[in-house]
Amino acid sequence: MRTPLLAVLLAVAAVPLPAAEVTVLTASRIHTMDATHPQAQAMAFDADGRILAVGDGTVLLARYPGATRLDLGAATVVPGMIDAHGHVLEQGLSHLTVNLIGTRNKADVLERLRAFARDLPPGAWLTGHGWDQNDWPVREFPSAADLDAAFPDRPVWLYRIDGHAGWANSAAMRAVRRDLAGSWQPDGGAIRRDAAGKPTGIFLDNAMKLLDAVKPALDDATTERALRLAMQDAARNGLTGLHDASIPLSELRVYQHLADRGELPVRIYAMADGNAAALDWLCENGRYRHPSGRLQMRTVKVIADGALGSRGAALLADYSDDPGNRGLMVTSPEDLQVVADKAHRCGMQMATHAIGDRANRTVLDVYAKALGGDVDGDHRWRIEHAQILSPEDLPRLARMHVIASMQPTHATSDMPWAEDRVGPRRIVGAYAWRQLRDTGVHLAFGSDFPIESLNPRLGLYAAITRADADGKPAGGWFPDERLTAFEALRAFTLEAAYAGFSENELGSLEAGKRADFVVLAEDPLAVPDAQLRTLIIEATYVDGKPVYRAKP
Ligand SMILES: [Zn+2]
């Protein structure tokens, strides 16, 4: 029954390339995210990483005889995932500073510092965070002397867990130009000194600025190193694209150097940092795209309000647990309008952080005014987080074609206290990705890494369960807002690609698109929800080349 069909296919199939330049991948299943052919077992792509065909293994192997065979056995293949909102440099920097959380004593601290310093160039500052003397046998502040024997020449500067104290060694204190001895104190801070007036190495609150001011500024080499580390994290977690939510022009230059050298393992969709040099550069030169397709910038990111946890999110009415407080706008409506008008004039996408219902309404008003009669054009303006929406505003996103760029793990992190902040009525429009999606909004998912883990498996799990790691609350928090696994995966692939104007190239596996894909040991659309968090990523491919493999 198969032979005649195969014969016909062989007769008509053109072989556009020498067979050796084609790879035919076969797997137990491929979730293509292509609505017309959602499932397949094979995919052919060329040496440039362009997908030639997706379909049946027998057919594709016959069509490309002599092609390199990539047999993935029982694995499941899905399109490369895209995190639509994260902070790449900050993610990388978290690797470049020593984590001292949970240290049991000073010896423990020194051990972690020594291990970390092995990879540092001589003389480079060793910085860390997270120590807490209350966890140690002697609950007293440590001193510079504790660090000096191990680090006589290398400056060491370590933040306490709450960020309100810093611990320096003598080499770091020598870098401060002012004499730290004596009895003077800075405003709003304290230098701890011994009986003889000599600083002990502990600096409280504003006194920490003395050290922060002499700590070397981030140079391009460190920036590059941090970006590389973050991109490795991404590849290891099945991410092939990152939307970098706000970078200055200087950081774009570092990315450009990496792209020129072919050293961007994942795709970066960078956003300009508000009404500053990067936006001016975009307005002057137009939308930016590196020839490799690995780096783009055509977006300006602005922050409208604060966060819900610290009651900084701008609400239309008082906080339910703090009468009289309605939060605050970080950027005034007038200043938001200036940026929106400029973005529209320059043909750039706008992405605005808005958490509270007042901030979200303001952003929608600002977008409406800037776009005017042109609102139905292909602008794809975004609201980042879109956490609390008033019922009247919720349908406006779909009407205005505004993308909701949301982070499922924010919901599950915030759920223990979110209702305390906004009360039982407003919580109904909070983290409302199901309601938004069902009104026709394009829903793009991300994590806001490193605030939350960049691991998209945790985001998929949170979107589907609305529960914590232990599955609590049972059935999920406001379970009507849960998505199916397919819908959640779509938000991390095709919809995130759409939010980056890349859905014609990325986000699904179909002929003509880029071979960006993830190889999973199990089927994310079939495993029990709890297993999503630990799904094994066997490999991540970008442009048909592995950028991560679990086994070499
Ligand atoms: Zn963010």
Image (cartoon, rainbow, N blue to C red):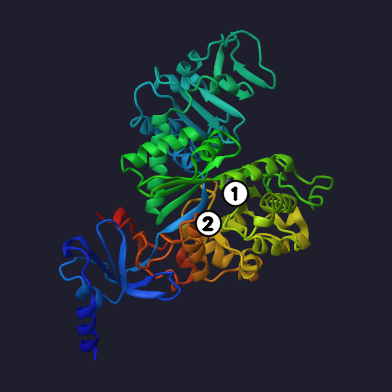
Q: Tell me which residue sits at (38%, 66%) in the image.
A: 509
Question: The disc labelled 2 sits on which kind of residue?
Answer: Ala
- Point out residue 213 in the picture as x, y percentages from the top left corner: 55, 21
Asked if residue 142 can be seen in this view, the reply is no
- Of the numbered discs in the image, which one, if any, rests on residue 499? 2
Residue at the right extreme? 324
Graded by Cα atoms within 10 Å as few (under 14), some (14 to 19) or many (20 or more), the crowding at tag 2 reads many
Q: Is residue 86 left or right of 391 when viewed as pictured?
A: left
Is residue 291 placed above or below 9 in the rendered structure? above
Asked if residue 517 can be seen in this view, the reply is yes
- Point out residue 308 in the picture as x, y percentages from the top left corner: 69, 49
Is residue 225 placed above or below 501 in the rendered structure? above
- What secondary structure is found at the residue carrying circle 1? strand
Q: Tell me which residue sits at (31%, 60%) in the image.
A: 50
Q: Earlier in the sequence, mark 2 or mark 1?
A: 1
**Rounded to the nearest whole Å, what is the CA distance between mark 2 and mark 1?**
10 Å
- Point out residue 160 in the picture as x, y percentages from the top left corner: 56, 32
Quick one: 501 or 312, which is closer to the camera?
501
- What secondary structure is found at the residue carrying circle 2? helix
Is residue 33 placed above or below 365 in the rendered structure? below
Question: The disc labelled 1 sits on which kind of residue?
Answer: Ala
Graded by Cα atoms within 10 Å as few (under 14), some (14 to 19) or many (20 or more), the crowding at tag 1 reads many
- Point out residue 375 in the picture as x, y percentages from the top left corner: 65, 57
On whether ligand 1 comes within 8 Å of the CB at mark 2, the answer is no
Quick one: 297 or 413, which is closer to the camera?
297
Q: Is residue 92 left or right of 16 when viewed as pictured?
A: right
Residue identifier under label 1:
351
Q: Tell me which residue sits at (42%, 40%) in the image.
A: 227
- In which quadrant of the rendered image does the N terminus lie? bottom left
Quick one: 377 or 422, which is closer to the camera?
377
